[in-house]
Image (cartoon, rainbow, N blue to C red):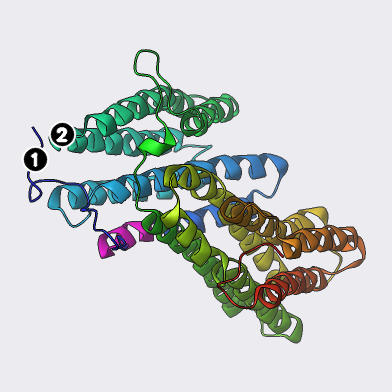
């Protein structure tokens, strides 16, 4: 039997009203400030091909547990006590997960895996219970499928946590492959069928706002790294110029995403007849590239601040130029997903990043960082000038 509205744990859908991100959700998101910081520090201290692969895997896991929670709180009401308690328990597990990140491929692999798997499966079980008690069989069936997929991946997470570092990477890669494939195939399960994106009745504006706030979290972490690193350095002219360059780059990255794209993405998903489809591709998958680009840029900024002079090595070029390039590529895909058009400013920007990488052999880290920041400013300025009025469609 369907519960009364006062007993329901689901968000109330109000015609013409948008579900806003609540304070409890913001509190939950603060856990991931710590996670993002841990990831950037991990990559900085493991700036090798293997370290890059490990960081990528850990980032994908952190993002996946966060975005799944965002989908669940899009359906469930965080103002209800039971949902709040669920989020608080997830925060506890999230702090354990974040604390374990630096040693995830060493002594704390099982701790990381157990925290991650418990968050994924536990949250989904709670959602299943909430939908069943509210008399929503279609949504409950969707979470039955999700739980089966996450339970299978959880086995690989746990086995990986128990294994040595080399096989651990392989087992965890399989676990992530299972989880990232799930939404793409509608969590198909024999006997239970598959979910359709049209069945995912989400508050598009709420999901867009949540993802935008995560971008702010990552950008904020980048600025924190810049300030902390500069504060510990001797204040020379090269260090000061590097500091201004890094800050200008962070501002330009904010501009590229928030000046136009974030707002239009929110409007597009709100007005869509199939918001689940846009939410799955543009926000669930594509935004991972944005976060990865910001984290990689933060590492590049710290290297540029600490060693502004001399010749840039490949391990410097990749984060200093590759980070902003990955961020712009993510924005290119995001804006294509919401407008159906490729942004010329972003395509030109990616070409300029490639040119900067070719010049890296003869440039210092500071010069290379300045070139990358200049490209970001060009992309932001070009898009702003070409679009002008925000009511005009994306595409130039």
Local SS, label 1: loop
Foreground residue among 255 and 120: 255
Q: Determine whether, in the image, residue 227 is placed left or right of residue 199.
A: right
Q: In the rendered picture of this protein, how many numbered marks are placed on residues?
A: 2
Q: Which residue is mark 1?
A: 3
Q: Main secondary structure of the magenta part?
A: helix
Give the image quarter of residue 165: top right
Foreground residue among 159 and 146: 146
Label 2 vs 1, first from the N-terminus: 1
Question: Residue at position x 66%, y 73% from top?
Answer: 387
Magenta region includes residue 310: no
Give the image quarter of residue 391: bottom right
Magenta region includes residue 26: yes
Q: Are marks 2 and 1 in contact (CB under 8 Å)?
A: yes
Question: Residue at position x 87%, y 61% from top?
Answer: 355
Q: Is residue 223 visible?
A: yes
Q: Determine whether, in the image, residue 216 is placed left or right of residue 92.
A: right
Q: In x, y percent, where is residue 144?
A: 30, 26
Q: Which residue is mark 2?
A: 135
Looking at the image, which residue sits at the far right?
362
Q: In x, y percent, where is residue 231?
A: 57, 79
Question: Residue at position x 72%, y 85% from top?
Answer: 236
**Where does the magenta region start and end?**
21-30
Foreground residue among 15 and 252: 15
Give the image quarter of residue 304: bottom right
């Amino acid at each position: 039997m369907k519960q009364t509205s006062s007993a329901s744990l689901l968000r109330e859908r109000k015609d013409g009203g948008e579900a806003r991100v609540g304070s409890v959700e913001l509190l939950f998101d603060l856990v991931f400030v710590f996670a993002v910081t841990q990831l950037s520090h991990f990559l900085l201290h493991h700036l090798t091909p293997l370290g890059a692969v490990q960081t990528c895997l850990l980032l994908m896991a952190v993002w996946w547990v966060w975005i799944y929670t965002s989908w669940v709180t899009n359906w469930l009401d965080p103002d209800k006590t039971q949902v709040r308690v669920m989020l608080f328990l997830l925060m506890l597990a999230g702090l354990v997960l974040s604390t374990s990140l630096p040693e995830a491929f060493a002594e704390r692999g099982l701790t990381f895996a157990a925290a991650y798997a418990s968050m994924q499966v536990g949250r989904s079980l709670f959602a299943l219970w909430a939908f069943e008690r509210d008399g929503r069989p279609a949504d409950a069936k969707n979470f039955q499928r999700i739980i089966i997929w996450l339970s299978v991946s959880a086995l690989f997470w746990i086995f990986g946590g128990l294994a040595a570092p080399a096989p651990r990477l392989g087992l965890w890669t399989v676990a992530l492959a299972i989880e990232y494939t799930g939404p793409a195939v509608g969590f198909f399960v024999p006997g239970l069928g598959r979910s359709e994106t049209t069945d995912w009745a989400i508050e598009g504006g709420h999901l867009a706002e949540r993802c935008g706030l995560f971008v702010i979290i990552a950008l904020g972490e980048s600025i924190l790294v810049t300030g902390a690193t500069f504060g510990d350095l001797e204040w020379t002219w090269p260090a000061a110029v590097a500091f201004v360059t890094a800050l200008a780059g962070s501002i330009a990255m904010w501009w590229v995403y928030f000046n136009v794209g974030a707002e239009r993405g929110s409007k597009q998903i709100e007005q869509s007849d199939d918001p689940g489809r846009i939410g799955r591709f543009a926000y669930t998958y594509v935004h991972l590239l944005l976060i990865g680009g910001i984290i990689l840029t933060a590492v590049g900024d710290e290297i540029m601040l600490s060693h502004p002079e001399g010749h840039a090595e490949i391990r410097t070029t990749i984060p200093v130029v590759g980070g902003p390039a990955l961020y712009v590529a993510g924005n290119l895909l995001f804006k294509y997903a919401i407008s159906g058009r490729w942004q010329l400013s972003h395509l030109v920007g990616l070409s300029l990043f490639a040119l900067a990488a070719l010049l890296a052999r003869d440039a210092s880290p500071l010069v290379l960082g300045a070139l990358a920041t200049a490209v970001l400013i060009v992309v932001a300025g070009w898009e702003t000038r070409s679009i002008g009025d925000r009511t005009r469609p994306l595409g130039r």
